[in-house]
Image (spheres, rainbow, N blue to C red):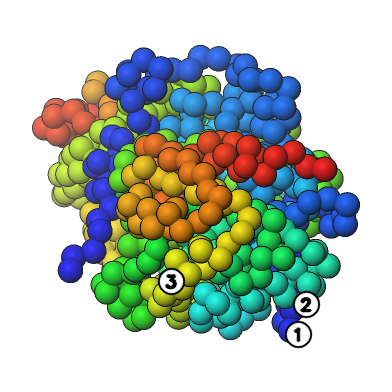
Amino acid sequence: MKLDVGGKEVFAYAANHELDPAKRTVLFIHGAGLDHSWFGLQSRYFGYHGWNVLAVDLPGHGRSAGPPLDAIGAMADWLVKVLDAAKVERACLVGHSMGTLVALDCAGRHPARVERVALIATANPMRVGEAFLDAAKRNAYDAFDMHTIWGHAAQQPLGRDQTPGMWSYGDAQARLERLAPGVLYNDLKACNDYADGLESAAKVRCPALLILGERDLMTPLKGAKALKEKLHDVKSVVLGPSGHSLMAEAPDATLDALVEFFGSAP
Amino acid sequence: MAGPKYPGFDTLALHAGQSPDPATGARAVPIYQTTSYVFRDTEHAASLFNMERAGHVYSRISNPTVAVLEERMAALEGGVGAIATASGQAALHLALATLMDAGSHIVASGSLYGGSHNLLAYTLKRFGIATTFVSPRDLDAWKRAIRPETRLLFGETLGNPGLDVLDIPAVAEIAHAVKLPLLVDATFTTPYLMKPFALGADLLYHSATKFLGGHGVAIGGVLVDSGRFDWDASGKFATLTEAYAGFHNMDFAEESATRAFLLRARREGLRDFGACMAPMTAFQILQGVETLHLRMPRHVESTRTIVKFLAAHRAVQRVIYPELPEHPDHDLCKKLLPKGAGAVFSFEIKGGRPAGKAFIESLRVFSHLANVGDAKSLVIHPATTTHYRMSDEDLKKAGITAGTVRLSIGLEDPQDLIDDLDRSLKLSQK
């Protein structure tokens, strides 16, 4: 569906359903350089199981108008405007990678709008290597390679994609090639610059779930330890032998963890 | 700092798409000879049917063995995914059926495999899909042939049988300027000799029966999507960008901009037309793919040796191979096919049809049959076989004469092949 947020068109995948005020809502927030379809299976499931779904394209990504927002805090505030535009009072947030920081920040600063928060592949701080940042700044293809290769468990290109016939490496690269110049750098820099993760975690009052990849190269397991200690009501699930792209590498296990955490639709 | 590296072609050819079987530890790709898959419960079944969970439902739609071949080919081509089909022709049909409606129009190279020419020139016409054929070398002709209802530009990486090298970067530029995709048949080149997506093609397919299998024991095809074409921005592909009543009003491009084509092709094309690949066939094709990087250099090396021999033979009028300086696409070949122009080529024998007949019937090592890309060397007379339905005018456009003989060079000792050719050429001139 298309929403108007501050005079700019925003796309949110709603799994082919109109929003129903009587239903609970799940809001999906994608990672750096990606879009709503990275949650394709999971968002579709919720949409067809009694939930409102809003899988957003952040500004400057996918089908949403740019420019991209340059700070995690700004993205978190923008999420609230999306909820306003959709006339949704409270939502369960599901973030992936950069989207976890956005979800965390939103849950910390706008607790009344967040019912539960699930963080898939997260770390604090979410430092981005200098070489990666530099390549993205130059809009060099190396940055897409780093994003794709480090974004999956090491065995993934030689393994078997869970979706028959698909090659997730190629799919990730095709998505990144669609980005306007500078968008990936914008996102990576936003992750790298975000320093409020622990503070936000401490302020979160709703239940939280961490879904982590055992072989995550981008946000290694140990990177979530401090967050876990700061969150008041938190559970975590480690999926092996998956890497950073858990929705693609372990789609069923990721979905099952979300379904169990969010509970049944009203 | 050095960046991370992708596995090389040789490694992908052996491993991509497969991990040791989780149930048994089997290292080789297991043949999942099953039509269907037991659901965990009704909820699981519904989720699989509605694309909420990944997995297999019915082997016409997907199969674990076939999926290994599909993923491996996508990896070797640099695509987002692939669909294996019952034949190369089924792959072409699947691509066209996914993109076309009655009233759509295709601009195609006039130098196509006879079966593809038949499909476009005669069969699809019955369903309201028209094709304009152009000389693949005439870039202005490609442009001129495009109409408002055109939906696709289509050619072969190496034309059949004149070995026209398709100028993929130039034809892709023409297509993309009017927001149309370019589909190529990459059968003759395989991903080892050329990567069409890197040159600008959007979709490609193979007759996997040929070099991918290499053994001549299985018929199959593979359709691969680069995931790079912007169906939304084109605005010409309602099958991908509007709600499809046949699948819960799914808007495929909304589901995924990069997977839209393959989603529709699998969910509609395989479901409704049903030209799927059998698991045993996928296993057999995979055995070939695993040695593609070893076989193709040998195919090319032997072909070069034989081309050189034939070009100097007094019974030969001319040899048509893009690596020869006199071939019209020689420069383009050097640019687009630096590893070689493949192992299929044509030559014209002196003495026309009778000489051609005598030559073919004298061969002992070469097999006279309708195939190419086998490990065994093959020969055929296109005017009376693969291209027999084409008019004289179309034959001429495709560079075929009554004396044209097509060879597919295999992996035998090249000297044995030369001896066979030499003896038969001499007999043909008596």
The vertical placement of B235 against B268, above or below, is below
Q: Is residue B203 above or below residue B220?
A: below
Q: Position of residue B226 (x, y in %)?
A: 49, 55
Q: Count up the numbered dots.
A: 3
Residue at the disc numbered 3? A191
Marks 2 and 3 close (CB-CB < 8 Å): no
- Chain of the residue on which disc 2 is drawn: A
| Type of amino acid at the residue the image marks with label 1 | Gly
Callout in the foreground (2, 3): 3
Q: Name the residue beneath numbered marker 1.
A: A7
- Whether A34 is drawn above or below B261: the answer is below
Q: How far apart are the two marked residues, 1 and 3, measured between alpha carbons?
A: 26 Å
Q: Amino acid at mark 2?
A: Asp
Q: Are marks 1 and 2 in contact (CB under 8 Å)?
A: yes
Give the residue at x 72% y 75%: A81
Q: Mark 2, residues whose alpha carbon is within 10 Å: few (<14), some, or many (≥20)?
A: some
Determine the residue positioned at 67% across, 27% down. B44
Task: Give me the residue at 55% from left, 15% from top.
Answer: B34
Q: Secondary structure at mark 1?
A: loop
Q: Which residue is mark 2?
A: A4
Q: Is residue B313 left or right of residue A137?
A: left
The answer to which quarter of the image holds residue A135 is bottom left
Same-subunit check for callouts 2 and 3: yes
- Label of residue B22 in the image: none
Between B401 and B202, which is closer to the camera in this rendering?
Answer: B202
Whichever of callouts 2 and 3 sits on the residue coming sooner in the sequence is 2
Q: Answer left or right for B351 relative to B43.
A: left
Give the amino acid at mark 3. Answer: Cys
